[in-house]
Amino acid sequence: MHTVWKGSISFGLVNIPVRMFTATEEKSVRFRQLHNECHTPIRYKRTCPNCEREIEKDDIVKGYEIEEDRFVILTDEEIEAAKPETQKAIDIVDFVDLSDIDPVYFNKTYYLSPQETGERAYSLLRQAMFDTNKIGIAQFTLRSKQSLAAVRVYDETLVLESIFYPDEVRSVAEIPGLPKHVSLPDKELNMARQLIEQLVTPFEPEKYEDEYRQSLLQVIEKKAAGEEVKEAPAEKPHKVVDLMEALKASLDQTAEKNKRA
């Protein structure tokens, strides 16, 4: 694994030197944009629409738009001076229950491992957090951005989950068309609850897979081998049925599936 950050975890007066690794990777089928005539990859140039010419990287400065077409220009030195002093520390300030944090706040996951002199302190924090069933809330800086983070135990490893600040999570009040105070028939609600109960199962992530990605890779393999690729038939629109009828059919279907399992 490639180390993306080196620093330390601090809580109280304890300081643990650690390395950080990206814990997840997005797997998707990526396409290059090609010229239709010769299949050459397209290149994009940096141009200034006002000067109508291509510009070099050294001619670019950073500007923050305070209103339309008005910018405050900042130098690299000014941006660097604004960075917090603790940019090489994961500073744990509180310990909380994991259930206290709604998943909407979670952003990206990183693994943490001890550096050469930190094994004992790392093991101590890991065991203490496991025993108390608590997670640490910390602040840290990665790639010039200060973030909140949750430090927790996962499969004998300490992991850091970067989490959004409250003002980075959009208010649900902005969502249009949310139904409020809808009167629901008891019979429909009981059947919906029953359907949920029938579908309850332990979470086993290995049983899920990206079916679209697998199918797309098969299409690519066939085309690369010179095989004909058939177009998928047009999807038939689902027949709109009565809600109670749909709930009953779903319950029957899951009951039959549970019998076969």
Image: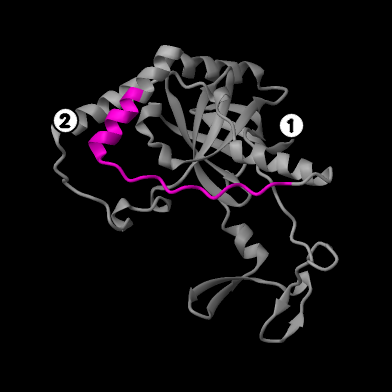
Label 2: which residue?
187
Residue 97 falls inside the magenta stretch: no
Q: Tag 2's secondary structure? A: helix
Quarter in which the N terminus is drawn: top right
Q: Nearer the viewer, residue 232 or 35?
A: 232
As drawn, the residue found furthest toward the bottom would be: 51
Q: Position of residue 142 (x, y in %)?
A: 61, 45
Q: Which residue is mark 1?
A: 1
Label whose residue precedes the other's in the sequence (1 or 2): 1
The residue lying toward the viewer, choosing from 43 and 84, is 43
Residue 90's spot in the image, x, y percent?
56, 36
x and y percentages locating residue 59 in the rendered image: 75, 75
Q: Is residue 26 visible?
A: no
Q: Identify the residue shown where x is 48% and y is 28%.
A: 12
Look at the image and give the residue range highlighted in magenta.
Answer: 229-252
Q: Residue at x 77, y 77 (%)?
A: 55
Q: Is residue 62 above or below residue 205?
A: below
Mark 1 nearby-residue class (10 Å; few <14, some 14–19, many ≥20): few
82 or 23, which lies in front? 23
Q: Nearer the viewer, mark 1 or mark 2?
A: 2
Q: Residue at x 35, y 31 (%)?
A: 100
Where disc 1 sits, the SS reads loop
Q: Position of residue 196 (x, y in %)?
A: 32, 26
Q: Which residue sits at x=65%, y=68%?
A: 75
Kindly identify the amino acid type of the residue bearing the numbered disc 2: Lys
Instruction: Identify residue type, mark 1.
Output: Met
**Lateral position of residue 258 relative to residue 36, left or right:** left
Q: Is residue 232 magenta?
A: yes
Q: Is residue 130 left or right of residue 111?
A: left
Residue 197: which quarter of the image?
A: top left
Q: Nearer the viewer, residue 232 or 123?
A: 232
